[in-house]
Image: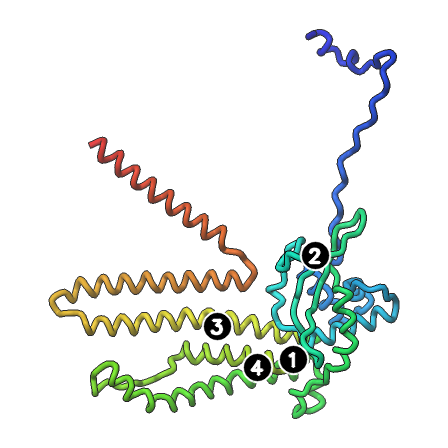
Amino acid sequence: LALVVSAPGVLAQPVPGATAQPAQPSAAEPVPPDPLGRSTPRGTVLGFLNAARKGENELAGQYLDTRLSGKLAEDLAHQLFVVLDAKLPARLTLISDAPEGSRSNPLQPDQDVVGTVTGEGGPVPILVERIRRPKEEPIWLFSSTTLDSIPSLYQEVSTTEYSAFLPESLKSARVRRFRLGEWLIVLLAIPLAYLTTGLLNRMLVPLARPIWRRIIGDARSQVQTVLPVPARVLLLSLLARWLLSSLSLSLLVRQFWSNVARMVTIVTVVWLLIVIAGKVEQYVQRRIPSANFAAAQSLLRLSRRAVELLFVFGGLLALLRHFGVDPTPAVAGLGVGGIAVAIDGDADGLFTAFGH
């Protein structure tokens, strides 16, 4: 048997009267990725917006699930871009970047809602649909259901009402395809809104003084400010988000300032919680008996630092979520690692104790 197996040509010889075995099929060749980046819902939306913003309507038409071709497809792509640029909510970072989509609706797993546009006839969902073609990678295209509503929505989109008071030179002026008037409006609105929060703080201080004295129980206590700096910045970010949703700015400008407002909101919330923790520490310190003041103060300071670290950690998790990073595996890994370190430390302590 060893001689037969070791001979290279013995097993390869055909047996008389035996039928030839069919050849095994070769492994399937990998499907090349889509060159237009339409493999995910986010890739389809961003690719379409980039192409249409550059005026490449022929390329933008490749992101539409339509039977139109030529000039008709290009016109439809332009109309879709105008509608999305004016009315689509600035939530591009929340669009799924997975090849299978978000699967938020189990009944329609091959459809994703990238946003909702409000028209005269009511809200219109902007859908992208996963299209499967033979011998090709599945791609995501703007659904034909959405495209049927675009011509009427395009007629409803008016010119920039917010820039009615701007001169024509600023309306038409562009810096790298960005309208200069939009940026001027936002940049002027931010300092004016911050000054408004300062005036609101001055108006609230006289009203808060008697309430604060009654809570503290000290008639000599003075309230210097009702809205500290982080509270004023938080109000400013909330006002900016409302302003961006109200003005007819382009989608790229709204997306940029919306990202800034969200990040500022997260940072200022953490900042405000840290300030409140400091005020709570001062309030508790005034209630500590003098006999146990040193020990209680040390414990109180340690507790405050631990709470502040929790606030900062929560803010970092929120920022990661905002940028589309799922921190759950990292947090789980830290938790398992901490448990392992604790168990290892306890085991070492037990072995040491038994050894002695």
Q: Which residue is mark 4?
A: 243
Q: Amino acid at mark 3?
A: Thr
- Could you give the CA–CA distance between mark 1 and mark 4, rounded to whole angstroms? 10 Å
- The secondary structure type at the circle numbered 1 is loop
Helix, strand or loop status at disc 2: loop
Task: Give the CA separation, mark 3 to mark 4.
Answer: 15 Å
Q: Nearer the viewer, mark 2 or mark 3?
A: 2
Instruction: Pick whichever of labels 1 and 3 is earlier in the sequence.
Output: 1
Reading the image, the residue beneath label 3 is 265
Q: How is the image coloured?
A: rainbow
Q: Nearer the viewer, residue 59 or 148?
A: 148
**Mark 3: few/some/many CA within 10 Å (<14, 14-19, 20+):** many
> Is residue 308 shown above or below 329?
below
Identify the residue at image location x=29%, y=88%: 209
Asked if the residue at tag 3 contacts the one at tag 1, i.e. Cβ–Cβ closer than 8 Å, the answer is no
Q: Which mark is residue 110?
A: 2
Q: Nearer the viewer, mark 4 or mark 2?
A: 2
Which structural element holds mark 3?
Answer: helix
**Quadrant of residue 279 in the image?**
bottom left
